[in-house]
Amino acid sequence: MSLFSGLAHDLKVGYELVKAAIVKAANEVPVIEKEIAGVEPEVVALASLVVPNAAAIATAANTVLEAVASALSASGSAAEQNFLNAGVDQAAIDAAKAVVPAFQAALAKKKA
C-alpha cells in the first residue's frame, strides 16, 4: 500500500466517523431539547449569576428582534428607512436583516 493510498484510506475512515457522529447528534436533538427545557430554571439562575439580569436582557433582546423582524418582513424598505430616520445605524439594520430568516424559522419551530 502506497503512502498516498494509505492517506486516502485514513481520510475516508475519518470522513465516515465524522459523518456517523453528525447523524447521531442530529437524531438526538429532540431528546436534548427536552432535557434542556427541564433544567431551564437552573440555567437561567446560573446565567444571572454570571450576568445579572441575563434573563431580562435575553427576553428584551428577543422581543426587540421579533419586532424588527416583523417590521422588516411586513414593510421591507419602508421599515428600513424608518429605522434609519430614527437613528438606527445601517450596519445594525443589515445585521438584523441577516438574521431575520433564521430567527423567524426558530420562532415557527418553537410555536409548532
Image (cartoon, rainbow, N blue to C red):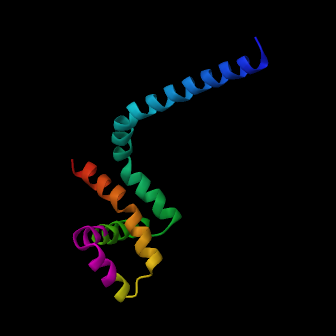
Specify whether 81 is left or right of 11: left
Residue 36: percent from left, percent from top: 38, 44
Whether 37 is drawn above or below 21: the answer is below
Quarter residue 24 falls in: top left
In the image, 62 versus 84, the foreground residue is: 84
Quarter residue 23 falls in: top left
The residue located at (30%, 76%) in the rendering is: 77
In magenta stretch: residue 70: yes
Residue 20: percent from left, percent from top: 50, 25
In the image, 75 versus 28, the foreground residue is: 75
Whether residue 55 can be seen here: no
In magenta stretch: residue 16: no
Specify whether 69 is left or right of 88: left
In the image, 24 versus 74, the foreground residue is: 74
Of the 4 image quadrants, the one containing the N terminus is top right
The magenta segment = 69-82
Residue 62: percent from left, percent from top: 34, 66
The prevailing secondary structure element of the residues shown in magenta is: helix
The residue located at (25%, 68%) in the rendering is: 70
